[in-house]
Image (cartoon, rainbow, N blue to C red):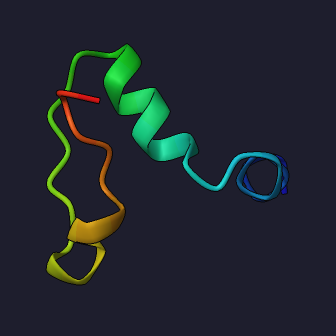
Amino acid sequence: MLLAREFLRDPYWPLHAAQALGQKVEWPVQCERAKPRADS
C-alpha cells in the first residue's frame, strides 16, 4: 500500500531512486523517446 501511494505521487519514483543510489537504469525500447537526455 505504501509503495502504491508513492507510485501515484511520482510515477518515475523507481528512476529517481536508482539515480539517487548511483545505479544505471536500462530503459525499455518503446520508452526511449521519453528518456531525458544528458545534454539537456
Q: Nearer the viewer, residue 16 or 6?
A: 16
**Can you give x and y, in whole percent of width and height, for residue 24 in the image?**
14, 34
**Can you give x and y, in whole percent of width and height, for residue 19 in the image?**
33, 24
Residue beneath the point at 55% across and 49% down: 12
In the image, residue 2 sits, relative to residue 33, either above or below, namely above
Q: Quadrant of the N terminus?
A: bottom right
In the image, residue 3 sits, relative to residue 8, either above or below, namely above
Q: Nearer the viewer, residue 34 or 4?
A: 34
Residue at the front extreme, as displayed: 40
Q: Is residue 21 left or right of residue 7?
A: left
Examine the image and state in which quarter residue 40 appears. top left
In the image, residue 11 sits, relative to residue 31, either above or below, namely above
In the image, residue 1 sits, relative to residue 28, either above or below, namely above
Examine the image and state in which quarter residue 37 appears. top left
Number of numbered labels in the structure image = 0
Q: Is residue 29 left or right of residue 17?
A: left
**Can you give x and y, in whole percent of width and height, for residue 5 in the image?**
85, 52
Residue beneath the point at 18% across and 27% down: 39
Residue beneath the point at 21% across and 61% down: 27
Q: Is residue 9 left or right of residue 32?
A: right
Residue at the bottom extreme, as displayed: 30
**Can you give x and y, in whole percent of width and height, for residue 8 in the image?**
81, 58
